[in-house]
Image (tube, helix red, strand yellow):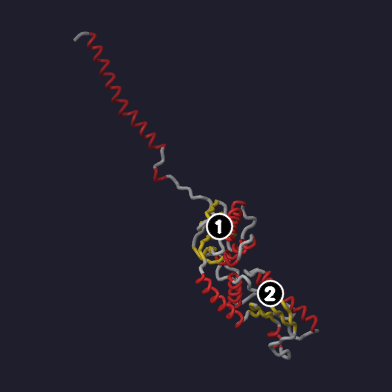
Amino acid sequence: MSKKALYLLGIAITIILGTFLYLKFCCNCCEKTTTDNTPKADTIAVQEPKFVPFVLNGPGINYQTNDNLKFLKNSAKLIMPVEDSVTTGIDNLKMFLASNPKQKITITGYALSDETNTTTFENLGLARANDVKNYFVSKGMLENQLNTKGVIIDKWKMSADTLLGSADYTFETIDSTSVANANDEWSVLKSKINADPLILHFNTNKSRQTLSEAEKQKVSDIAKYTENVKDAVVVVVGHSDNVGNRDSNIVLAQKRAEFSKDYLSKNGIDSSRIETQSKGPDDPIGDNNTPEGKAENRRTVITIK
């Protein structure tokens, strides 16, 4: 074999050997680096959104924003002020309901199972729905187009101690049959309220703020009635025993009526729809000659007009 042929053979062997060594060592190295630096698809963390959207989605309205109404944990009061984008949605809802009087919206409020309910409502979710409703009414919506509902759940999205948008909204159309049935329902409820009215008793010269469970249920019934009967008026009549002069007792009984009105307005009843009166010592139900009778006479009586 000539010297030139040996030279060319050596070059060929070198190229082949170099290619083999590159494929064996360098490509494995590159593959390992790529594998180590690229996360596997099933290990990528999915980031949940840090908001609960405010959604109004019904026939003829579709509005959504990532801002929302908010409540502190254990509280039934909306956090104020409300974000501008939510206010815009509420304005849209107001115009929609005004243009569609047969439309009704149910506000469902949510509360966590570990929250404490200090309201007179059946549960904190219902109390929150009622506060949302009151806010909507303050923006110009009609009460008779707003229903409320409360639901207790185990989990809701939160930011620290704030629940994000713990309410949602469903739309329905009112038909004549349902209106007639509803009228019958409210007539029955009014009769129930007036047949066994809410009576709050007071110590001498004092008002009280604690109610029994039965009394709280009566407050809830009155609130439910006024929510659904737009021309309903609540009447609060104050009474006293006969200790002292009549004029002073008239004033004291009026203060008791005003105290009761304030309590009702804080628990879901529009204060503009509550009338107060005072009968002082003029309408006793107990014997003013006994301590027990006097205690019965120091009262307010709450009925539907």
User: Would you place residue 124 above or below residue 277 in this image?
Assistant: above
Whole-percent x, y for residue 34 in the image:
39, 35
Quadrant of residue 228 in the image?
A: bottom right
Residues at discs 2 and 1 in contact (Cβ within 8 Å)? no
Assess disc 2: are there few (<14), some (14-19) or many (≥20) residues with their C-alpha within 10 Å of its C-alpha: many
Q: Residue at x 37, y 31 (%)?
A: 30
In what element is the residue under mark 1?
A: loop
Q: Nearer the viewer, residue 203 or 36?
A: 203
In this view, 163 is above or below 268: above
Compared across the picture, whether 61 is left or right of 276 comes to: left
x and y, in percent, of residue 220 in the image = 59, 73
Label 2 to label 1, Cα distance in Å? 32 Å
Kind of residue indicated by mark 1: Gly
Q: Which residue position holds label 1?
A: 165
Q: Earlier in the sequence, mark 2 or mark 1?
A: 1
Residue beneath disc 2: 260
Residue at the limit of the structure toward the left, as seen here = 1
Residue situated in front as seen by the camera: 179 or 303: 179
Location of residue 112 in the rendering, given as x and y in whole percent from the top left corner? 52, 63
Q: Is residue 90 left or right of residue 175?
A: right
